[in-house]
Amino acid sequence: MKALVLGGGTVGRACISVLHALGVWVTVMDVNIGTLRDIGKQFNEEVNTAISNRYNIKKLLPEIDVVYNCVRWPKNATEFMIDREMVRSMEKGSVIVDISNDVGAIETFHETTHAEPRYIEEGVVHYCVSNIPGAISQSTSIAYAASVLPHFRSIMTNGVAEACARDGFLRRSLTAYKGYLTHEETSGIQGRPWVRPEDILGIADRNLDPAPPATSTKSDNFIKL
C-alpha cells in the first residue's frame, strides 16, 4: 500500500509511525525542510520526504492508495490544498482520511460522525470524523488530563504571567485576558482588535520562552493600552 501523510507535526509523525511499522510505502510532505530532515532521521531514512506544495501533491496522488491530512489549514487560505480535480485523479476506491478537518484544505471535504463516518466523492472514499479520539473517549480524557496538568500546576504555582513567560506555547494559546482579545489568529479572521499576550501580561521586556506561530494569519489591528 502507498500512503501520503500531509504534515509532519505530532499527529503526522504518529501516523507515519503506525504506517511504517505495518510496512507501508510512506511519503510525508511538510513545508518545513527541517521537519522533514528530523523525520528522515527518526525513521532511518526509510520513509520518503518531500516539500508540501500543490505541484508535488498533484504529481503523487494518482499512485497513492490513502491520504492522511494532518495539516492545520489556515482559515484565511484562498485556495484548496487538494482540489476536486486532484481528488478525481486518484484511483477509484482509494481513501482520504482528513484528520485535521479544516474547511478549505480539501475541496471534497464535509464533516462526518462516528455514526456515519464515510462518504464517496469522485470515486474516492472520504473519512472525515471531526473527533476521531472520541471513539476511545476514556483513554483520550486520560491523555488530555495528563497533558494539561503541568500547565495548571505552573499557573497555580507561578501565576498566569510567569507561567506564560516560561512556556511560549501556553502564552500563544492565551485567547482573552482581563476583557481583551489576546489571540492574533482570531483578530485576523474576525477583524477584532487585539493585544499581544506579553504586553497585557507585562512581560514584554523579559527573555521569554519562544514558540512558533500557530498559523500564517497575521493581524496588526492592535489595541492601544
Image (cartoon, helix red, strand yellow):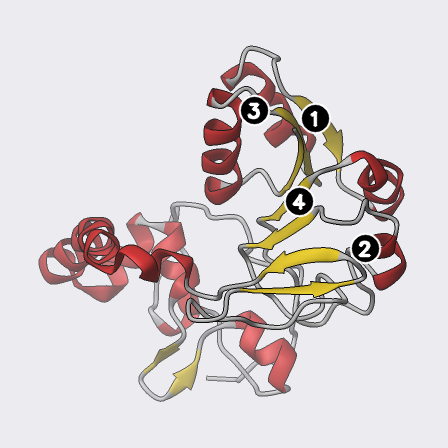
Between marks 1 and 2 in the image, the one whose residue lies nearer the viewer: 2
Specify the amino acid type for callout 4.
Answer: Val
- Would you say residue 91 is visible in this rendering? yes
Counting residues from the N terminus, which is met first, the one under dot 1 or under dot 4? 1
How far is the residue under mark 2 from the one under mark 4?
A: 10 Å
For mark 2, give the secondary structure.
helix
Q: Which residue is mark 2?
A: 87
Residue 69 percent across, percent down from the top left: 62, 50
Name the mark on residue 39: 3
How far is the residue under mark 4 from the one under mark 3?
A: 18 Å
Q: Is residue 112 left or right of residue 115?
A: right
Residue found 89% across the figure and 38% down from its top: 59
Q: Quadrant of the N terminus?
A: top right
Counting residues from the N terminus, which is met first, the one under dot 4 or under dot 3? 3
Q: Are the residues tagged 1 and 3 within 8 Å (C-beta)?
A: yes
User: Which of 184 and 21 lies nearest the eye of the viewer?
Assistant: 21
Counting residues from the N terminus, which is met first, the one under dot 1 or under dot 2? 1
Name the mark on residue 49: 1
Farthest residue toward the left? 157
Residue 136 percent across, percent down from the top left: 27, 55
Position of 60 relative to 41 (above/below): below
- Classify residue 214 by image quadrant: bottom right
